[in-house]
Amino acid sequence: MWTLRFFLNSILFGAGLAMDAFSVSLANGLHEPTMKVRRTCGIAGIFAMFQTAMPLIGWVCVHTIRQLFSSAQRFIPWIALLLLLYIGGKMLYDGIRHKGAEEEAAAIGLSGLLLQGVATSIDALSVGFTIADSTWLPALVESLIIGAVTFGICMAGLWLGKRFGTRFSGKAEILGGVILIGIGIEIFVTGLR
């Protein structure tokens, strides 16, 4: 059970699942290039929290409400698409509306970050199916590893976004909105396959 393969698979799961969160983190860094370290850690923490919770929720669903969850699974791509279209569209609108304005873009609020966290981690529910044969402790450890990997990857995305956001200045919010809309479409198309 506690083999090198278990830990390696958990890390790889985390890296694969964190790619959407990485892209959104990049967009958030572009949107807010003067973000402080505490806020950066908080944003990465929100993504990590959702990426940790979703596989556990999926595991619980497999063990308790398998039939109900499998019928609702087809809506996951739609939910992610709508959430990211809303957030990305708002960033695009704000970026275009303030075109030419020299003021710094407002920070994304907690509700926006929570929506991003749900939208980018909802596909991690399916990981609960792959760990369904595990008992609760290995499922918890795997979910915690996924969350830790997500945290590190999101910190890198935020740092890169902040670094390049200062170079893009006014265009960063528009680019961030386009990235979020693209991620939403990608999740939707992948989920339909």
Image: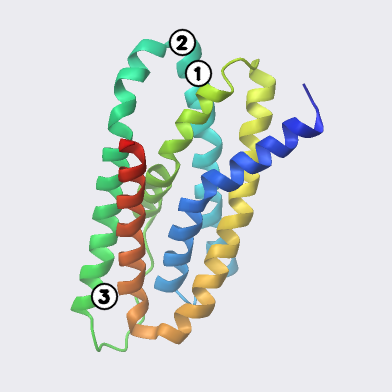
Q: Residue at x 46, y 52 (%)?
A: 20
Cβ atoms under marks 3 and 2 closer than 8 Å? no
Q: Which label sits on residue 60?
A: 1
Q: Report the side of 82 relative to 130 (left or right).
A: left
Q: Amino acid at mark 3?
A: Gly
- Up the image or down, 126 lies above or below 19; here it is above
Q: Looking at this view, is 192 or 11 the one in front?
A: 192
- Up the image or down, 60 lies above or below 9; here it is above
Q: Amino acid at mark 2?
A: Thr
Instruction: Tell me the distance, in whole angstroms, between the alpha carbons under discs 1 and 3.
Output: 41 Å
Cβ atoms under marks 2 and 1 closer than 8 Å? yes
Q: How is the image coloured?
A: rainbow
Quadrant housing residue 76 = top left
Q: Residue at x 52, y 30 (%)?
A: 127
Q: Amino acid at mark 1?
A: Val
- Do we see residue 61 in this rendering? yes
Q: Residues within 10 Å of mark 3 (few under 14, many from 20)?
A: many
Q: Give the residue number, with chain letter if any, for mark 2.
A: 64
Q: Give the residue number, with chain letter if any, for mark 3.
A: 95
